[in-house]
Image (cartoon, rainbow, N blue to C red):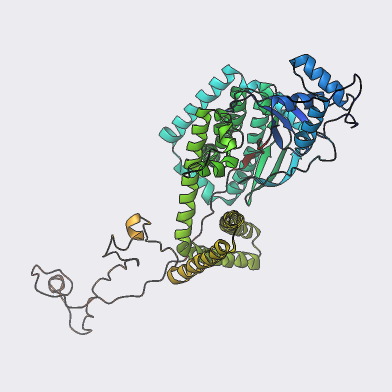
Amino acid sequence: MAIRQLELPEIDPTGAPPPALADGTELIGEYEGSGYRDPTFLARRGDGLTVRMTPLLYEIARRADGRRSYRQIVDDLNRAHGGDLTTLDVWRLAGEHLQPAGILAGPQARTLARPPETLGLRLRLGVLPPRLTGFLAGGLTPFFRAGVVIAVLAAAAALDAWLFAAHGVARPAADLLTHPSAMAVAFGLVIAAGGLHELGHAAACRYGGARPGRIGAGLYLIWPAFFCDVTDAYRLGRGGRIRTDLGGVYFNLLFCLGLAVAYAWTGHEFLLAVVLLQQVEALHQFFPFLRLDGYYMVADMIGVPDLFARIRPTLASFLPGRQLDARAGALRPAARRLVAAWVLLTVAVLGCSYLLLLASLPRIIPTAARTLQAVTIKLIGALAAGHALPALLAAGELISVALPLAGFAYVLALTVMRLLRALWNGAERPWPRAMLAVVSAAAGLVLGLNIVAHGRPIQPAEAGTIQSASPGLTPNADPEPRRPLSLPQAPPQHPVTAVSPVAATSSPSLAPTSNPNVAPSSTPSATPIPSPSPSSSPSPSPSSSVRTASPSTSSSP
């Protein structure tokens, strides 16, 4: 039989001051349409991290206003829910869960650090404050009315049908590539479209009844990108959250319609090229294996906020003899299966991408070095000649070539370091750690020797097929570009003897013979063929719209 402590009326046995929410903490409410078995409530800390809580912890936090003592909170909870909690129970829950999670102020507050985001946004800088973002989003909410949405989608479909079936994309692409001033204007339009994309997320969030946060810029891996804080959209149901996810792509369609109107007014073909680029960017946003709009759509449809945090426990659950992880056990069976399917697809897609990139390194590095050298020479020549616009274009070309290489190197190094750190921490004995160090060093050495031994630039005549990558499939393949055969040279005419036209046409050295056994009078002489000069083209930049962090921390009594 459990012995309960006797509590006197109006006496708080803890002697602690009245609890209060930490600075900047905001209680969001119940997470509707979640994939968890039990009801889940959310709160957002001052640093932007969203914390998942049980109903009891949320009720305690909701009553922690800095005026009511623990004894008054207990009395209110017991009257509202018919429980038999004691003051010490609530005090212990607050000290063990709410304060370490950063929800309540106190001696244990903020000891739970913000976990690093996998493939997340870093170095965030605000551009529009929350109040201005909300004001602008409020003026754009009429675009989400049903009639307006149907009209916009129909107009976008008609624009695509005309562009691809009637007008074509060759002239817009040629106009964009042959006029440097048009390329500069197009670059500014792409940046403006990125900002409008984030306003679309904010307007959709405001239309559903939630409050959008700031709009800013940051670094996604290594590429610059815009973001919009729409964490308050977790107040909405599943439909409202998905509408918020689609708001950015929807505003990209509005931007395309505006460019079409500008083309009809001015006749500039490069505007239609920007329309094509915007539609490619919209399709790229639906990629669900990075923190893009498609990722948040999948998370909101399943009802599980942070899918990347579940990769490791989901993979561990497939090992024989391993018990089901507590985080996976907290999900409903349907949600758990969907999360497992997403994890397997994500690991397969990203893993194959890494393997293909590693296998292509011996060709990518020499090709990129050759291109960077050519672009650098072009830039130096433009600067020496005092040509500002060609120098600016060459500098942009240099950045567009170097930035993807730096991004790939950063992502590869980050992935390898995290994998090695996880394996090192998982090895409790010195021998596994020593083997890990030896295997890692050997793998790095083999990769370096492979790059040195097989590294050569990609040739212009290479097809890049699977057969060309596997010499055993094509034993007669010629990796070098074929040289054109030189025509037989006619023997010089005698300077004195005159040749009649009839004799000239019947000369065996000039006219082909019908006898296959007769050899030509002169042998082909090979003439030197100049090697093709390296060419470079700007690589496409990554998506410029990244959402903020989703809930990844849970607190349970």
Which percent across, then down, holds residue 470?
33, 60
Give percent across and percent down for residue 225. 65, 44
In the picture provided, is 338 more to the left or to the right than 390?
A: left
Residue found at x 85% / y 26%? 70
- Residue 239 showing in the rendered view: yes
Query: Is residue 99 positioned above or below 507 on the image?
Result: above
Res 416 quadrant in image? bottom right
Rendered location of residue 205, percent (x, y): 67, 27
Q: Is residue 81 above or below residue 539?
A: above
Q: Residue furthest front?
A: 1
Say whether residue 266 is left or right of residue 386. Answer: left
Q: Residue at x 63, y 60 (%)?
A: 391
Give me the residue at 50% from left, 48% from top: 350
Q: Is residue 386 above or below residue 30?
A: below
Out of 168 and 297, give the one closest to the viewer: 297
Count the labels in the image: 0
**Horizontal arrangement in the rendering, residue 525 relative to residue 257 (left or right):** left
Image quarter hosting the C terminus: top right
Quadrant of res 198? top right
Q: Nearer the viewer, residue 347 or 213?
A: 347
Residue 269 shows in this picture? no
Q: Position of residue 233 (x, y in %)?
A: 67, 28
Quadrant placement of the N terminus: top right
Closest to the observer: 481 or 360? 360
